[in-house]
Every structure is written in C-alpha cells, then in structure tokens.
Image (cartoon, rainbow, N blue to C red):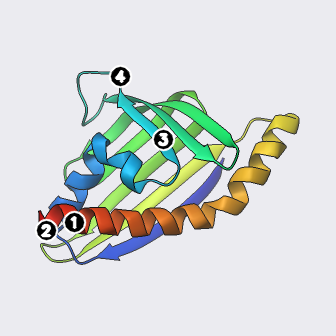
C-alpha cells in the first residue's frame, strides 16, 4: 500500500468540521475528483454505512465500494474499500470550539502489472494537487456551511 498523510488547521469548531466531513452529500463538493458518493445502505453515517464512489483522476475513473469501519463522533471517520479500487481513507479530528486540526490518511494499493504501472503514472503525480485542492475546498465548504 502507498500512504499519503496530510494535516490541515481550520479556525472552526471541531464539531462543525466533523459534521461537514461526515455528511456524505458534501463529499463531491470538497474531495477532489469525486464524481459519485452515494449511500448503498439506509444508514448514511457511522460504522456500517456503505457508499458507491467514483473518482476521476486524469483520463481514468476509479470505482470503489466503501464501508465505514471506524466512527467516533467528533474524533474519527475511517472508510475502507470492500470492492473495486483498494483504498482506505481516515480522518482524525482534534481541537476545540474555535480551532480544529484534521489529519487525513489515504492508503491505496494499485493493481499489479502494466495496468498498475499505468494507473500509478496517473495517480502518484496528481496526489499533491489532489491534497491541496481538497484542503482548500474543505475549508471553503465548512466555512460557508458554518456561516449559514
């Protein structure tokens, strides 16, 4: 697996940041390349919630089914793939009523062979741009939601 780790600091209460990230409806608006993030279960938050997701990276669209495997209110959300593109995404939230640090871990495994090398050539150079875009979009989205 390849792991990408990133931290962002925002001047918004942890509960508000957590609620925004936890709301599946906001994901395509802040997570770079996500074109689809639809619930497959009636439960849309917490351990067991399952989603059909697609992410466009360059000319390639990756599909995966994600299941929430860890969820602690205002502290942790982890989604692991159960089908499709092999990925694990984890968000940890720390802070106070005025300031929040979000730590994101993104682990993924590329398929072997020529297909894996081709996919790696697309994904790996794009990761830093993906993180920067996602960070800016997340801050903007939470700030706008917090102001509403």
Label 1, residues with CA under 10 Å away: few <14, some 14-19, many ≥20: few
Question: Residue 12's quadrant in the figure?
Answer: bottom left
Q: Mark 1 points at which residue?
A: 144
Is the C-beta separation of discs 2 and 4 under 8 Å?
Answer: no
Question: Residue 24's quadrant in the figure?
Answer: top left
Q: What element carries label 1?
A: helix
Q: Could you give the CA–CA distance between mark 1 and mark 4, rounded to whole angstroms?
A: 28 Å
Is the C-beta separation of discs 1 and 2 under 8 Å?
Answer: yes
Q: Is mark 4 on a helix, strand or loop?
A: loop
User: Residue visible at 19% across and 61% down?
Assistant: 145
Comparing marks 1 and 4, which lies closer to the viewer? 1
Label 3, residues with CA under 10 Å away: few <14, some 14-19, many ≥20: some
Question: Residue 55's quadrant in the figure?
Answer: top right
Q: Mark 2 points at which residue?
A: 147
Q: Could you give the CA–CA distance between mark 2 and mark 4, rounded to whole angstroms?
A: 31 Å
Which of the two discs, 3 and 4, labels the residue nearer the N terminus?
A: 3
User: Residue visible at 45% across and 36% down?
Assistant: 36
Q: Mark 4 points at which residue?
A: 40
Is the C-beta separation of discs 3 and 1 under 8 Å?
Answer: no
């Amino acid at each position: 697996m390849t792991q990408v780790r990133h931290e962002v600091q925002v001047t918004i209460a942890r509960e508000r940041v957590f609620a925004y990230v936890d709301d599946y409806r906001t994901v395509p608006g802040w997570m770079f390349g996500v074109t689809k993030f639809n619930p497959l279960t009636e439960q849309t938050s917490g351990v067991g919630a399952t989603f059909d997701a697609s992410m466009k990276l360059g000319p390639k669209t990756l599909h995966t089914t994600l299941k929430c495997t860890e969820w602690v209110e205002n502290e942790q959300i982890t989604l692991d793939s159960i089908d499709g593109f092999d990925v694990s995404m984890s968000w940890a939230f720390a802070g106070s009523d005025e300031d929040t640090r979000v730590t994101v871990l993104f682990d993924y495994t590329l398929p072997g062979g020529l297909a894996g090398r081709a996919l790696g050539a697309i994904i790996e150079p794009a990761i830093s741009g993906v993180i920067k875009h996602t960070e800016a979009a997340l801050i903007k989205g939470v700030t706008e939601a917090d102001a509403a």
